[in-house]
Amino acid sequence: PQPVLAIVGRPNVGKSTLVNRILGRREAVVQDVPGVTRDRVAYDAQWSGRRFTVLDTGGWEPKAEGMAAAVAAQAEYAMRHADAVLVVVDATVGATATDEAVARVLRRSKRPVLLVANKVDDERLLADTASLWSLGLGEPYPVSALHGRNSGDLLDAILAVL
Ligand code: GDP
Ligand code: MG
């Protein structure tokens, strides 16, 4: 069976957009309304001649209350069932309490965890990523899932740990 990469993070950080970027096609559902991805969805991906499965998680909990627990539960699931986990945060917002709840779960992971600072659409936003070190998940990878900025570098980093 091919390795599984899970994408976790709170609603609206751009998980599904990043999944589409990784797949190179529009398949994961993206919407401006937080919480649009229902349940977990698996997709076949390929990069540099290697195949892997991408698991898009989260978003099924639209209510703010209880959201941290729900997203943390997805992170827990990902940690147990994936070979590597991408934690996506919105660099333009910074680390929220929900992001911290996710990070708390994944700091215990025995599998590789990569921290993705999404929505870094241009150079000027790079400075915003420095504060994300506080999540304790290592160096944030700045990307723009929407525009594809640095997504090739991220995919190379993913393959290196998958
Ligand atoms: P999810 O809930 O985490 O799956 O987030 P979505 O992929 O559905 O994206 C939520 C919103 O963020 C949508 O309006 C996206 O177009 C937007 N978005 C996603 N990635 C980026 C990005 O890199 N830059 C900007 N500016 N917006 C983004
Ligand atoms: Mg989604």
Image (cartoon, helix red, strand yellow):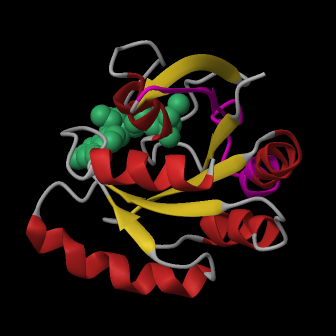
- Residue 138, position as x, y percentages in the image: 55, 79
Name the foreground residue: 44 vs 133: 44
Q: Residue at x 44, y 71 (%)?
A: 140
Location of residue 137 in the rendering, given as x and y in whole percent from the top left corner:
61, 75
Q: Nearer the viewer, residue 68 or 129?
A: 129
Relative vertical location of residue 104 with respect to residue 159 in this rendering, above or below: below
Question: Where residue 123 appears, x then y in whole percent?
Answer: 10, 68
Query: What residue range appears in magenta?
Result: 49-71
The residue located at (71%, 25%) in the rendering is: 2
Horizontal side of residue 137 vs 157, given as left or right: right
Residue under the point 51% across and 50% down? 158
Q: Residue at x 33, y 21 (%)?
A: 24
Please state if 91 lies on the left or on the right of 124 as rendered. right
- Residue 4 % position (x, y): 70, 34
Image position of 127 (left or right of 68): left
Between 41 and 34, the one lying in front of the other is 41
Reply yes or no: does residue 17 show up in magenta. Answer: no
Quarter of the picture holding the N terminus: top right
